[in-house]
Image (cartoon, rainbow, N blue to C red):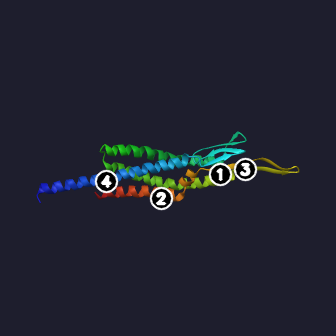
Amino acid sequence: MSFWGERCLRGNTSNSQDKTLSKLTLLSLVIMLLNAIYKLTLTLIPKYTFSGPLSGIIAIAYNRLEYYGSPIEVDQLKSIATLSIPPITLYMFELMASLTMIVMLYRGREASTIIKLMFGLSLASMIMCGLIIGLTRSLDIIAQQLIINNNYVSNAGIIKFGETRMEIATIAIILANPTIMIFSETIQMVSSAINYVKIHEQ
């Protein structure tokens, strides 16, 4: 084969590899985008709704509770909300970054730079997943402790001042499943790792 023939063949192979890499990168960015939306929804959607003497809602990122109409604060819930700030910040950045990088990829920006940033975000997201699982379990424990039964026994009989009822959002139960959370992070990590390995093989 002539020199120009070999060069043309290499060029065609390189272009084919670039297109494949771009498609894989786009797929990884979509996965990151969906994972960020998933985790933000998990942290922001109210999981528990209370009615009765104690009324209001609680989520990982915030809570609003009233006891007989007077606002109250629960220190443990405030701690959970504070600890949720780092993962929420990361997932918001992932959301904006993935959208931005998808646009950059369509405009012909070199995929290697995008892949390196995406891989770093995936590592950080995997670490934050453990924190979110811990915060979710803590929220569940505290929610059970907030159920109040204001029934008193006196000489006149049982006096009922009301009982707190708790409802759990079905969507929140599904989203808070640790298996689903770990699976989504694993998919994102694996897809990012594959792209990261490919750019080092070229």
Determine the secondary structure under disc 1: helix
User: Where does the image place residue 3, in percent across and percent down from the top left?
Assistant: 12, 56
Horizontal arrangement in the rendering, residue 157 relative to residue 104 (left or right): right
- Position of the N terminus by quadrant: bottom left
Dot 3 amino acid type: Ile
Disc on res. 21: 4
Dot 1 amino acid type: Ala
Residue at screen point 79% across, 50% down: 151
Residue placed under numbered mark 1 in the picture: 143
Q: In terms of image quadrants, where is residue 9?
A: bottom left
Residue at screen point 24% across, 54% down: 14
Q: Is residue 112 visible?
A: yes
Q: In terms of image quadrants, where is residue 107?
A: top left
Determine the secondary structure under disc 4: helix
Determine the secondary structure under disc 3: loop
User: Where does the image place residue 54, in percent across and percent down from the top left?
Assistant: 70, 45
Determine the secondary structure under disc 2: helix
